[in-house]
Image: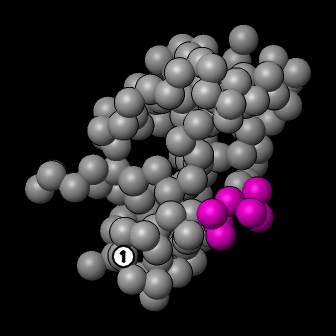
Amino acid sequence: MKVRWSSAPEPHDYPAAQSYLGLLTDPDAAAQLVRLLSTQPITLHKAKDILRAARLPLLALDDPYVAGDLKRIRAGKKLSPVLLVRGDLNGAPLLIADGYHRVCASYHLSEDADVSAQLVARVV
């Protein structure tokens, strides 16, 4: 079974990303990151690499959002690309601004699954 990805994130993904990023930085920087994300091309990254770079654990199969995404995958429905903010080599991890559960659902199918994403560098 292979994950099918939409060609662009859902419109509600950007406000969700901004809400999350607003917990990590000031509102103006969060808004700027989301504006930049919305202009980025779609790229593919391995599920295992995203989780490692973000330093996040794999959510369990019984997580309701992961289970829901796996159900959508089995039904042949497309998932929305994830929204990522690049980490750095000074210790800041990759941020999954939106789509953590979609990354985990993909990983449960195969750690080498390609995950569709928009990726932006951190605002300094």
Position of residue 91 relative to residue 33, above or below, is: above
Please tell me whether residue 14 belongs to the stretch shown in magenta: yes
- The residue nearer to you, when weighing 22 against 115, is 22
Please tell me whether residue 7 belongs to the stretch shown in magenta: no
How packed is label 1: few (under 14 Cα within 10 Å), some, or many (20 or more)?
Answer: few
Q: Is residue 12 left or right of residue 27?
A: right
Q: Measured from the top left, where is residue 13 in percent x and y?
A: 68, 59
Which region is colored magenta? 10-16
Q: Measured from the top left, where is residue 42 in percent x and y?
A: 60, 51
Which residue is located at x 85 percent, y 31 percent?
A: 77
Q: Give the structural element (helix, strand or loop) at label 1.
A: loop
Which residue is located at x 50 percent, y 57 percent?
A: 97
For mark 1, what is the residue?
25
Q: Is residue 9 left or right of residue 99?
A: right
Q: In the rendered image, is residue 52 in sight? A: yes
Image quarter in which the C terminus is found = bottom left
Quarter-of-image position of residue 116 = top right
Image quarter in which the N terminus is found = top right
Q: In the rendered image, is residue 114 in sight? A: no
Which residue sits furthest left?
Answer: 90
- The residue nearer to you, when weighing 33 against 59, is 59
Which residue is located at x 56 percent, y 69 percent?
A: 19
Q: Look at label 1 and name its amino acid.
A: Thr
